[in-house]
Image (cartoon, grey):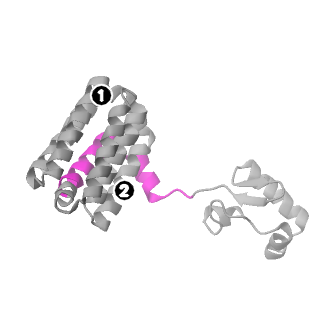
Amino acid sequence: MRQAIVAGTYKHGEKLPAERHLADAFDASRTTVRLALDQLEQERLVTRRVGSGTFVNHRPVSDLDNIADSTSPLELIEARLGIEPHMTRLAVLNATNRDLEKMNEAIEKAEAAGDDPELWTEWDTQFHLLLAEAAHNRLVLWLYQHINEIRSHDQWASMRDKVLTPARIAEYNRQHRALLGAIASRDVEGAAAMVTSHLHFARRQLMGIEGA
């Protein structure tokens, strides 16, 4: 049963068959099945809910989890430098009025977050995801979503409060405003240059923290 859960035969959140069905499947007594479930519960691989049944409580480690755990914030910025300038060019060409409105709303929320690094990061993340959506290229969006997920891992969170001083938050907000203006003006190369400068600015802050 443990092997089946770890291998993903039973998915996270899936309800396991009733004890009698498990006993038949594994050619074991119901007492043995009950003891096995007790052990799996102790290992936190399953969760029992009175009146509802037994549910799998295990997420297999994905390739994304592995790479996220070994990727530094600096490497993340460098990867973003590889994709965001062209993503921004596509956004300039393809963004709808509604795309521009949603990006503006995200900037307003980031500005309203004040000096709160955690809340500001949520809206900064949303702004860049909306920028990816505005490119209207599904593959680019898929790639950027995977890159962006890494920002939620511990390496970034542990450095966030050091990097995001009030002065830097204010500067990032100013840069977002300028970038949105270039996109709305359909300035392809100007917008690409701005997002490149924006990411280099972030890279310098991270290098300063990592070198401290």
Instruction: Kindly report the distance in space between the C-alpha atoms of the residues bearing marks 2 and 1.
Output: 26 Å
Per the image, label 1 sits on a secondary structure element best described as helix
Per the image, label 2 sits on a secondary structure element best described as helix
Marking on residue 209: 1
| Image mark count | 2
**Rendered residue at 29%/57% (across/down):** 98
State which region is magenta. Answer: 60-86
Most frequent secondary structure within the magenta stretch: helix
Query: Of the residues under marks 2 and 1, which one precedes in the sequence?
Result: 2
**Rendered residue at 11%/55% (across/down):** 188
**Rendered residue at 36%/32% (across/down):** 112
Hey, which quadrant is residue 2 in on the image? bottom right
Q: Amino acid at mark 2?
A: Gln
Q: Assess whether residue 70 is covered by the magenta stretch.
A: yes
Q: Assess whether residue 43 is covered by the magenta stretch.
A: no
1 left or right, relative to 170:
right
Give above or below for 10 relative to 127.
Answer: below
Q: Look at the image and tell me whether residue 118 can be seen.
A: yes
Q: Quadrant of the C terminus?
A: top left
Name the residue tied to disc 2: 145
Of residues 14 and 21, the one nearer the viewer is 14
- Indicate the position of residue 208 as horizontal and vertical percent values: 25, 28
Give above or below for 49 relative to 174.
Answer: below
Q: Amino acid at mark 1?
A: Ile
- Indicate the position of residue 159 as horizontal and vertical percent values: 38, 31
82 left or right, relative to 112:
left
Foreground mark, 2 or 1, reads 2
**Rendered residue at 15%/41% (across/down):** 197
Q: Look at the image and tell me whether residue 72 can be seen.
A: no
Give above or below for 140 relative to 187.
Answer: below
Hey, which quadrant is residue 113 in on the image? top left
